[in-house]
Image (cartoon, grey):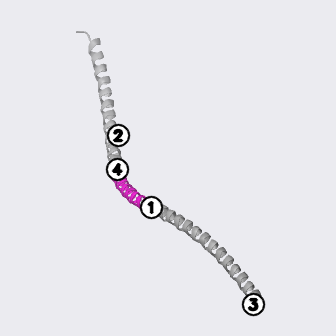
Amino acid sequence: MEELLGKILNELKDLKNNQNKTNEKLETIDSRLGNVESRLGNVESRLGNVESDVHIMKTQLKEHGQILSSLQKASEFHKADIDNLTSQVAHLSGEMKSGFDELRETNRSLFEMYGYHEAEISKLRRRPV
């Protein structure tokens, strides 16, 4: 019976040792789980920061789109003004060219008349008075 009690005692000691080892493993697992939860909290915090940054970027992107749209409209308006000015310059250039042609013709006529008058004046000077 003592032998049986000795075996039971040894078995109880083994069970207690196994229980202690299991408790140590559970404490290790619990500690590691705490680390995982802490790291998960950090990840969630960083994800919140990323979401905030994305929201800011979306707002800026929307503002940039509005600015680009305004610039495009202004560009189209300025292009229309430039096209109008180009047309006006071409029209004025044509008017100036025809005006210069008329001035040349008038100038030629004046030079011809001047030459005729010079010839007449020369004739009159040569006549005895």
* Badge 1: residue crowd in 10 Å (few <14, some 14–19, many ≥20): few
Q: Position of residue 127 (x, y in %)?
A: 27, 12
Query: Which mark sits nearer the N-terminus, 1 or 3?
Result: 3
Q: Is residue 126 above or below residue 101?
A: above
Amino acid at pointer 1: Val
Marks 4 and 3, Cα distance to the nearest angstrom? 112 Å
Amino acid at pointer 3: Met
Q: In the structure shown, which secondary structural element does the residue marked by tag 2 occupy? A: helix
- Do callouts 2 and 3 mark residues in contact (Cβ within 8 Å)? no
Query: Which mark sits nearer the N-terminus, 1 or 2?
Result: 1
Q: Viewer-nearest of labels 4 and 3?
A: 3
Q: Which residues are magenta?
A: 52-79
Marks 2 and 3, Cα distance to the nearest angstrom? 138 Å
- Do callouts 2 and 4 mark residues in contact (Cβ within 8 Å)? no
Q: At 32% from the left edge and 40% from the top edge, which residue is drawn?
A: 98
Q: In the structure shown, which secondary structural element does the residue marked by tag 3 occupy? A: loop
Q: Nearer the viewer, residue 95 or 85?
A: 85
Amino acid at pointer 4: His
Q: Which residue is mark 3?
A: 1
Query: For the N terminus, which image quadrant?
Result: bottom right
Q: Which mark is residue 54?
A: 1
Q: Which mark is residue 97?
A: 2
Q: Is residue 32 left or right of residue 51?
A: right
Amino acid at pointer 2: Lys
Q: Position of residue 38 (x, y in %)?
A: 52, 64
